[in-house]
Amino acid sequence: MLSVIVPTHESERILVRTLACLVPGATAGLVGDVILADGGSTDETAQIGDVAGCRFLEMPGSLGPRLGAAVDAAKGQWLLFIQAGAVLDSGWVAEVQPFIDRAPVEMAAIFTPAAPLSAQGSVLQAILALLRARRTSLSPGRGLLISKSLYRALGGYRDCAGTEADLLRRIGKRRLAILRTSIVVPALS
């Protein structure tokens, strides 16, 4: 079973599309629970999570301890960390399930980046950005699929700047598979 952990903070406007892309995993029996690790939202983030059947853990403060608390609450032996607003391609379940079934627990995986959700920029700029992102496999924002045992063996997310990049470095390229499923992340405004 897979536990999905979504760090949130004032995420009501972008959370629905992320939760919607997880529905195929829930209907296939892959996703056992979704946890919103919230940093103290004052908008409707909690209500959206409640309607979608998510567990809402509010823990203002840094990201590392917040994600650690979500892992402690997670039911699954595999974890999927995905940022609020990110969307996985519709076929993600068909790739993630076999990975979980066959990969050693010492392996982790990230998704292939797609063009950001933005109406600005040319097609050429989007293609160049995609090529740069594929070349840098340890770049954050690509979702992370990791066994709970590997997450804990590595010490989890630390309370530091660049929390996600830090964990990816500790996993290392040798233990990190790149899944073909693409992930679209929200453009920074």
Image: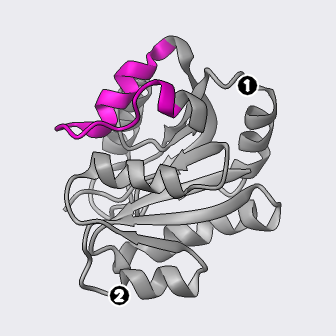
**Is residue 53 found left or right of 49 in the rendered image?**
right
Dot 2 corresponds to which residue?
44
Q: Is residue 146 above or below residue 93?
A: above
Range of the magenta residues?
151-173
- Asked if disc 1 and disc 2 are in contact, CB closer than 8 Å, the reply is no
Amino acid on which disc 2 is placed = Glu
* Residue depicted at 47% across the width and 84% down the height: 48
Q: Of label 1 and label 2, which has the lower sequence position?
A: 2
**Is residue 136 found left or right of 114 in the rendered image?**
left
Dot 1: element? loop
Q: Is residue 149 above or below residue 79?
A: above
Give the image location of residue 173, x and y in percent. 47, 15
Give the image location of residue 102, x and y in percent. 80, 27
Residue 96 within the segment the image draws in magenta: no
* Residue depicted at 61% across the width and 20% down the height: 106
Dot 1 corresponds to which residue?
103
Dot 2: element? loop
Nearest the eye: 71 or 54: 71
Please identify the quadrant where the C terminus is shown: bottom left
* Residue depicted at 45% across the width and 21% down the height: 171
Q: Is residue 32 above or below residue 54?
A: above
Nearest the eye: 9 or 153: 153
Which of the 4 image quarters holds residue 175?
A: top right
Whether residue 147 can be seen here = no
Amino acid on which disc 1 is placed = Ala
Give the image location of residue 32, x and y in percent. 71, 61
